[in-house]
Amino acid sequence: TPLMMASFSGDVAAVRLLLAAGADPRKRDNDDKTALDYAIAGVPDIDNFTVGACLTGAVEALLERDPALEPVSGGFGKLERIKTRLSGCAKIGRLLDRRR
C-alpha cells in the first residue's frame, strides 16, 4: 500500500498525510506484514535500501495513530525488538516496549 511504501522509505510526512487521509495502519499485505513491520525492518530495495536505517519517525507516526499496533511478523514482535537493538535502533525498541 502507499502507507507501507512511505513507511519503509522513512518518509514521515507522507506517513502522517496518508494516516490523516484514512490509510489503515493495520492492513496486511500478501506477506502478512503491516506498515509498522516495514518501518521497523526497512526494505532491501536497490533504489532505496532502508534495512537497518532506524526509521524511527515512521514508527512514531504509526504508533501515534494507533498505539495498540504490534509487529505481526516474528512472533508478537519479539524478533523485531531484538533486531532493533542489534542494528542500533534502540529508540524503536523502546517505543515498542513502552506499550507492554
Image (cartoon, grey):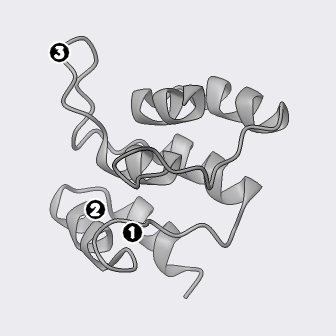
Q: Quadrant of residue 72?
A: bottom left
Q: Residue at x 39, y 45 (%)?
A: 30
At numbered mark 1, what does the secondary structure look like: helix, strand or loop? helix
CA distance separating discs 3 and 2: 22 Å
Left or right: 22 with respect to 84? right
Dot 3 crowding, Cα within 10 Å, few <14, some 14–19, many 20+: few
Is the residue 57 above or below the residue 94 in the image?
above
Q: What's under tag 3, amino acid-wise?
A: Ile
CA distance separating discs 1 and 3: 26 Å
Q: Earlier in the sequence, mark 1 or mark 3?
A: 3
Is the residue 59 above or below the residue 15 in the image?
below
Nearer to the camera, 8 or 25: 25
x and y percentages locating residue 6 in the rendered image: 52, 27
Give the label, 1 or 3, closer to the camera.
Answer: 3
Q: Earlier in the sequence, mark 2 or mark 1?
A: 2
Q: Residue at x 16, y 64 (%)?
A: 86
Q: Which mark is residue 84?
A: 2
Tally of numbered discs: 3
Q: Residue at x 57, y 25 (%)?
A: 2
Q: Quadrant of residue 13?
A: top right
x and y percentages locating residue 22 in the rendered image: 82, 38
Q: Which residue is mark 3?
A: 46
Q: Which residue is mark 1?
A: 93
Question: Are discs 1 and 3 less than 8 Å apart at CB?
Answer: no
x and y percentages locating residue 33 in the rendered image: 41, 52
Q: Residue at x 60, y 66 (%)?
A: 69
Question: Are discs 3 and 2 less than 8 Å apart at CB?
Answer: no
At numbered mark 3, what does the secondary structure look like: helix, strand or loop? loop
Question: Are discs 2 and 1 less than 8 Å apart at CB?
Answer: yes
Is the residue 11 above or below the residue 69 in the image?
above
Nearer to the camera, 2 or 32: 32
Left or right: 17 with respect to 41? right
